[in-house]
């Protein structure tokens, strides 16, 4: 049986992502992969044909499973239309009103392409429901498609504990009436302090991390291989930024079992 072709697409990922570098990496591992470019252009999808469907993939209530935005308003549809007409990355809102149900978004993507396996790199933020609420994800897979979110790489794995402690202390001090820098300025200074311990939107390490998440999607879609328990393997399901950086950058490879698996496949 011929191996399935792998097609990579983009849907407004952040500029730090270099899809061509990921394609070269995957080809170097012996995978049959082709970069198709913008998902909507490659599949001939007009903004007006997709905006309402994408708006319906948004999560309406973060505390309720399956709470989709089934009846989107004109403002939400208009916002999606603007996203589609622009190639700028989609910013996650503070109120999380443009968070997407990951499986619904994956079903949207997989409804258009033809045969093969399809990986879509996007700045849309997917989430899945677990433990009484929706949680942001980096990768969501639903055969024969998977989405990998550049926003998810930044926002889904937890940052160092000290980062949140300092941020909480800042908010308490502001509530107490102390004169402090504006929140955005304080947050940027905090990011600078911890910049080696998490990946941000303009971080050149973003592409390196995305390589591993592409492999996670490929191993699952092609061979049904779930995540790896080895913290040094690219298939490790990292829950924190530091775990992700270790698996994808400091280690940056597959464990012995998955290396052999790939060689035999």
Image (cartoon, rainbow, N blue to C red):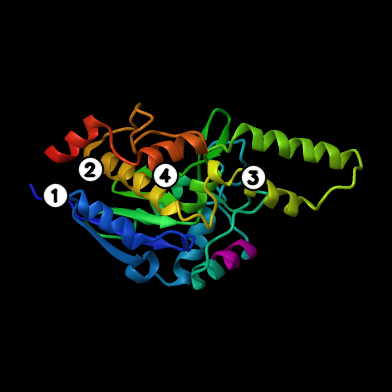
Contact, mark 2 vs mark 3 (Cβ under 8 Å): no
Q: What whole-number distance in Å separates the C-alpha atoms at marks 3 and 1?
A: 46 Å
Q: What whole-number distance in Å separates the C-alpha atoms at marks 3 and 4?
A: 28 Å
Q: Which residue is mark 4?
A: 139
Q: Which residue is mark 3?
A: 193
> Sequence order check: which comes first, mark 2 or mark 3?
3
Give the quarter of the image for residue 24.
bottom left
The residue tagged with tag 1: helix, strand or loop? loop
Q: Is residue 7 visible?
A: no
Q: Disc number at residue 222? A: 2
Q: Is residue 247 magenta?
A: no
- Figure quadrant of the C terminus: top left
Q: Disc number at residue 3? A: 1
Q: What whole-number distance in Å separates the C-alpha atoms at marks 2 and 3?
A: 40 Å
Camera-near label (2 vs 3) is 3
Q: Position of residue 26 (x, y in %)?
A: 25, 52
């Amino acid at each position: 049986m011929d191996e399935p072709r792998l097609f990579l697409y983009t849907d407004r990922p952040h500029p730090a992502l270099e899809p061509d570098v990921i394609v070269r990496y995957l080809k170097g591992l012996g995978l049959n992969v082709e970069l198709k470019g913008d998902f909507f252009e490659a599949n001939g999808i007009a903004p007006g044909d997709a905006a309402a469907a994408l708006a319906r993939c948004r999560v309406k209530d973060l505390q309720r499973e399956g709470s989709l935005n089934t009846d989107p308003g004109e403002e939400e549809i208009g916002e999606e239309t603007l996203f589609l007409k622009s190639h700028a990355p989609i910013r996650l809102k503070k109120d999380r009103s443009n968070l997407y149900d990951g499986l619904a978004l994956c079903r949207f993507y997989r409804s258009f392409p033809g045969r093969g396996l399809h990986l879509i790199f996007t700045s849309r933020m997917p989430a899945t429901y677990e433990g009484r609420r929706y949680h942001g994800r980096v990768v969501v897979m639903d055969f024969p498609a998977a989405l990998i979110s550049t926003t998810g790489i930044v926002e889904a794995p937890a940052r160092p504990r000290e980062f949140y402690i300092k941020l909480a202390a800042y908010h308490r001090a502001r509530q107490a009436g102390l004169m402090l820098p504006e929140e955005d300025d304080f947050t940027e200074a905090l990011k600078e302090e911890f910049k080696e311990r998490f990946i941000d939107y303009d971080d050149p390490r973003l592409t390196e991390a995305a390589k591993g998440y592409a492999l996670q999607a490929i191993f699952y879609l092609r061979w049904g291989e779930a995540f790896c328990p080895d913290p040094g393997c690219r298939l490790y399901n990292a829950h924190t930024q530091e775990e992700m950086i270790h698996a994808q950058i400091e280690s940056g490879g597959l464990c012995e079992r998955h290396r052999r698996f790939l060689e035999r496949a």
